[in-house]
Amino acid sequence: MTKLNELENWFADKNKVMIALSGGVDSALVAYAAFQKLGDSAIAVTADYKTLSAEELQTAKQICSEIGITQLFLDYDELQNEEFTKNDSTRCFHCRLELGDHLLNLAKEHDVDVIVDGTNLDDLGDYRPGIDALRQNGIRSPLVETNLSKPQIRQIAKSVGLSVHDKPSNSCLASRIPWGQRVTAERLARIEFGETIIKQLTKVKQVRVRDFDGSAKIEVEKNDLSEFDNLVLDKITEKLKMVGFTSVEIDLEGYKPGKINVIAD
């Protein structure tokens, strides 16, 4: 039995399933496997909240179109949650706890018996308080339960033709703001604008614009640093200052997920 067969068979005894789909390869593969086994009894749900970029939302829609799965949307404002916006080390926990509540309510409306997400085996080794919150609401992780790692997931996703098989990992826009600095709509907007501009002016696919109280620090993969010559950096700096950043610099160490554990990524 292949790992894909194993994943698909995980859904065999389920009646109706709801997949929390973010736009990444992990939840995309879960949605694919669920749809292969359950057809229209599998539903994808994407939370269209304030910390999700427009690019990620569009990717989530594209994934569902490729698979053929029905997609529903949750539209709520997590910026109304003080436990989230104060942005301490429990931010992800409170975000996912609220998401879980919304998913449970939607599941009841659609007679869903199990909600699943895209957490994979490798995620368990990171600092991911959001996983604990989802577990509190009974949300399950088929990729973990079938022992699938990120490389395996990418390989399977490629074999079944999912366009996001090589998509770089991403995280919510709030992860660009250091703990202890408030999450606001203004900051999220300028972060998203900055990352969009950088992708337009360069060939980089993996980028983070960290917002340190208005100072932008750009992180890209080390082998992409050569994209930022003086002319390009001047253009980026000009654009970012137009939306409220006071200074702009490149992090020469390159992109590292969850750097110094101050920013959960």
Image (tube, grey):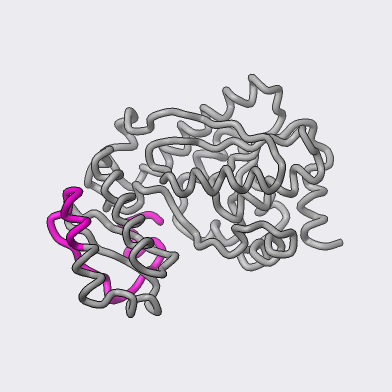
Name the residue rendered at 29%, 51% in the picture.
191
Which of the 4 image quadrants contains residue 19?
top right
Q: Residue at x 32, y 53 (%)?
A: 176
| Image spot of residue 32 (x, y percent) | 71, 48
187 sits to left or right of 165? left
Q: Is residue 120 rendered to the left or right of residue 228? A: right
Depicted 17 relative to depicted 6: above or below: above
Residue 260 belongs to the span the image colors magenta: yes
Q: Is residue 120 above or below residue 186?
A: below
Q: Tell me which residue sits at (19%, 62%) in the image.
A: 237
**Residue at the left extreme?**
246
Which residue is at 70% across, 46% downward?
67
Q: Quadrant of residue 137?
A: top right
Q: Is residue 148 magenta?
A: no
Region of the chain picked out in magenta, as a range: 237-265
How far across and how far down the image is residue 231, in percent? 22, 73
In this view of the protein, which residue sits in the foreground, 23 or 125?
23
Is 21 left, or right, of 38 in this rendering?
left
Task: Pick the quarter of the image with the C terminus.
Answer: bottom left
- Residue 74 in picture, x, y percent from top left: 51, 30
Instruction: Tally the marks.
Output: 0
